[in-house]
Each structure stands twice: as structure tokens, then as C-alpha cells.
Image: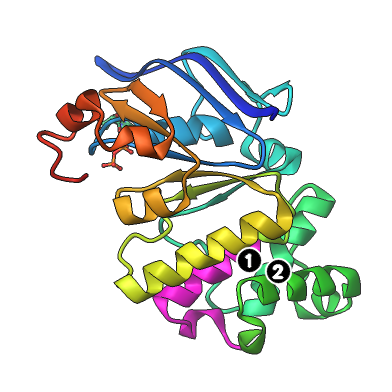
Amino acid sequence: MTPILEVQSVNKRFGGLKALDDVNLTVMEGTVHAIIGPNGAGKSTLLNCFVGRLVPDTGTVTFAGQSLIGKKPHEINQAGVSRVFQTPEIFEDLTVLENVMIPALAQRDGAFRLHGWHPLSREAEIRDKAERALADVAMADRRNMPSGSLSRGDKRRLEMAMCLVQEPRLLLLDEPTAGMARADTNATIDLLKRIGSERNITKVVIEHDMHVVFSLADRISVLAQGHVIVEDAPENIKGNAKVQEAYLGGAHL
Ligand SMILES: Nc1ncnc2c1ncn2[C@@H]1O[C@H](COP(=O)(O)OP(=O)(O)OP(=O)(O)O)[C@@H](O)[C@H]1O
């Protein structure tokens, strides 16, 4: 297996607070790598360093052999990294299909290019790609619905389609099941498993729900106080004393 994302000696401070403290992490291509840890451990800060929203004070982040340090978010996105946000970022007034077409256009053209309805409807190739991405998340039948009218779960699936249409090599998922009922959570787990097997997309998942983590992850990194305290296979994480301690007696595990 080849590493696709390599994080070496990354540090990030916010004033006096050391949010990331010498973080090292290697994500292998084609795997699901979960990053877990208590509240405030630095998970979102780390993810933000992967997408160019934050720049580490020191250290390196390398994706598919190229450094991401100093790259702008849209450059990182074009390089093959997509992120699904905790709160879906969709255009509520546009239809489901249009929402999926926009990131594909942005990726092709290098920037957002919103020329209104008519040019969008003439983009046959982009439309086909968008239709495929919608089918992947089982939302083809909702293609003409206004996105604002979707349920919360469907909005998250729509956002996943908006990532998939860009054909990323690395998909970053920030608490993909946060706020979902158990049935929706299980449907999302199945969806993520399917997407992985069909498209060979590497996934990095930040997640508090251990049912999700242990259902999906091939590898788990545990962050505590900005530092990776353990990186191991799921079966070795549950009983790990350091992990139990980080979670204050193992209440989450
Ligand atoms: N922009 C910022 N300015 C100042 N402090 C910040 C900023 N972003 C994060 N922090 C702090 O850095 C630490 C790590 O935060 P981060 O959000 O990365 O943790 P997390 O593991 O994602 O937490 P959670 O699971 O609660 O989302 C926290 O103490 C947080 O308050």
C-alpha cells in the first residue's frame, strides 16, 4: 500500500494554546482512516490544515507526493481532496442536480462560474457526471427538487454527491453522522462503505460515534491535547489504556 496523505511534525498554536503538538500521521491509499479524540483534541484543526483553511506553524502535509503547505483551498480541492462539512454547504434555492453540477464546473474551470440556469442546463457532460454522483448516493429521483426542501439527512447525502462529482482521491468527512438518528447513521455507514469499494477513494473520517468509527475504519489515530497518542488497527484501539485514559475512563468506548 502507498501513503496518500502524510503529516509530519505538524504544530499549530492559537495564541497561548497548542492546538496541534507535533502531529504525525500517515494515511494509506484506499483505506478509511478515522481520527478520534475527546472534544478540543485538535481534530478539526488538523482537518483544516489538510484543506488549506489553516496553515501549520511548522511541519509538513503531503498529499500524493506534493506539499499542501501554502496551497489555497481551491488548489487543494483541484489536486483531488474534497471535504464533506458537518453542516451541509449547499445552495438552497437551486435544485439538487444543479447543486451537484456546480462543484464539477468549479473543478473543471478552476473557480466558481455561476452564469445562471441556461448555461448550466447546456453542460451535458457535467450533467451526466452529476447524475452519476446522485445515483451513487441514491438521490437520482430527487434531482429536480429545490435543495432547501430536502430533509437534513438528504442534504448531507447531497453534499456527499457534490464531493463525489469532483472524483476526489481523498475524501475528508467531518462527523458525517452528527445529529442523525440511528437508522440514518446506519444508512450513511452503508453508503460510505459502498462508495469506498466502487471508487477506491481514500477517506479520512472525524467522528465521535464509535459505532460509526468501528464500522468503517481500517486504521484509527487517537488525538488528545493536540497530539496523536496512538495509531493502530481498530481491534487494538478499544482496549488501549492510553485511549481509555484520554476518554476519561472510557465512557465513549
Ligand atoms: N480559530 C481558533 N482560535 C482559537 N482557538 C481555537 C481555534 N480553533 C480551535 N481552537 C482551539 O483549539 C483546540 C482544538 O480545537 P478543535 O476544534 O480542533 O478540536 P476538536 O478535536 O475538533 O474538538 P470537537 O470534537 O469538540 O469538535 C480547542 O481548544 C479549541 O478551542
Going by the numbered disc 1, the residue's amino acid type is: Ala
Density class for disc 1 (Cα within 10 Å; few <14, some 14-19, many ≥20) is many
Q: Considering only vertical position in the picture, is 189 above or below 53?
A: below
Front residue of 218/94: it is 218
Give the labeled residue for mark 1. Answer: 161
Q: Which residues are magenta?
A: 145-163
Residue 203: where, in percent of width, then height?
57, 45
Q: Residue at x 46, y 72 (%)?
A: 187
| Pointer 1 or 2: first along the chain | 2
Front residue of 239/230: it is 239
Q: Considering only vertical position in the picture, is 122 above or below 220?
A: below
Residue 41: where, in percent of width, then height?
28, 30
Residue 21: say if magenta: no
Question: In the rendered structure, are the residues bearing label 1 and label 2 in contact, judged by CB atoms less than 8 Å apart?
Answer: yes
Residue found at the very far left of the displayed protein: 249
Going by the numbered disc 2, the residue's amino acid type is: Ala
**Location of ligand 1 given as a quarter of the image:** top left
Give the labeled residue for mark 2. Answer: 133
> Visible in this render: residue 166?
no
Q: Residue at x 34, y 60 (%)?
A: 178
Density class for disc 2 (Cα within 10 Å; few <14, some 14-19, many ≥20) is many
Q: Considering only vertical position in the picture, is 115 above or below 6?
A: below
Q: Quadrant of residue 136?
A: bottom right
The C terminus - image quarter? top left
Lateral position of residue 163 relative to residue 250, left or right: right
Q: Residue at x 25, y 28 (%)?
A: 240
Lateral position of residue 19 relative to residue 4, left or right: left
Lateral position of residue 241 relative to residue 161, left or right: left
Q: CA distance from mark 1 to mark 2?
A: 5 Å
Residue 176: where, in percent of width, then height?
43, 57
